[in-house]
């Protein structure tokens, strides 16, 4: 069966599985939204940390067979805009090799898996978008996702 980005994955027949079990995806997404709402309403964390934690958990849930990182970055950007903050560029506008940037990103996510959010927070803060680039980046990301 061909899988298309944007469709939730079905239960896999092999033992290979990234993220939560497919049957738990709706529950985990609902819990993430509830937790994020609580963090915001009770000022549990500063806004950048809320965004970093939201992003980590959404990628960890892994609701799609492909494109979970892109989906997580887009959703996190929308969350930041709703909080009145600038989006993170996630390293898309730098002169550093993208492989190096991706390695730092993945390492930061792995540290967050161990409940150490500082590397992810440092990573996202180092890639804050400027107001001019925010709208352009959002349209670019949406266009890329629609093309998939």
Image (cartoon, helix red, strand yellow):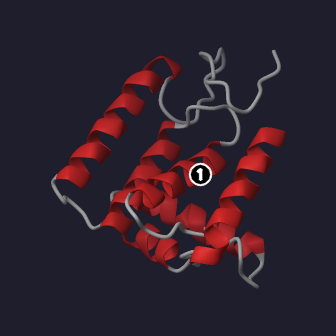
- Does 6 sit above or below residue 147? above
User: Is residue 16 shown to the viewer in this render?
Assistant: yes
In the image, 134 versus 50, the foreground residue is 134
Residue at 62% in and 50% down:
69
Residue at 71% in and 81% down:
94
Q: In this view, does 66 lie to the left or right of 31?
A: right
Residue, disc 1:
74
Q: Is residue 88 left or right of residue 49?
A: right
Residue at 36% in and 29% down:
30
In the image, 19 versus 127, the foreground residue is 127
- Does 102 sit above or below residue 10? below
User: Quick one: SS at disc 1?
Assistant: helix
Disc 1: CA contacts within 10 A as few (<14), some (14-19) or many (>=20)? many
- x then y, percent, for residue 19: 52, 36
- x then y, percent, for residue 1: 81, 15
Q: Is residue 4 left or right of residue 50?
A: right
- x then y, percent, for residue 47: 33, 65
Extreme bottom residue here?
95
Extreme left residue here?
42
Question: Considering the image in quadrants, where does the C terminus appear?
Answer: top right
Residue at 69% in and 64% down:
137
Tally the marks.
Answer: 1
- x then y, percent, for residue 143: 78, 48
The quarter of the displayed image where residue 118 is located: bottom left
């Amino acid at each position: 069966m061909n899988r298309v980005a944007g469709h939730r994955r079905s239960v896999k027949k092999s033992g290979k599985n990234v993220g939560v079990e497919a049957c738990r995806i709706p529950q985990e997404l609902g819990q993430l939204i509830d937790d994020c709402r609580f963090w915001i309403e009770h000022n549990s964390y500063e806004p950048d940390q809320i965004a970093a934690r939201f992003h980590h958990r959404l990628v960890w849930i892994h609701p799609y067979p492909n494109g979970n990182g892109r989906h997580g970055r887009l959703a996190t950007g929308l969350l930041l805009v709703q909080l009145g903050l600038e989006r993170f560029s996630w390293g898309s506008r730098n002169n550093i090799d993208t492989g190096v940037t991706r390695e730092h990103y993945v390492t930061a996510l792995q540290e967050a898996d161990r409940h150490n959010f500082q590397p992810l927070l440092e990573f996202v803060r180092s890639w804050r978008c400027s107001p001019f680039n925010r709208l352009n980046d959002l349209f670019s990301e949406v266009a890329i996702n629609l093309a998939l």
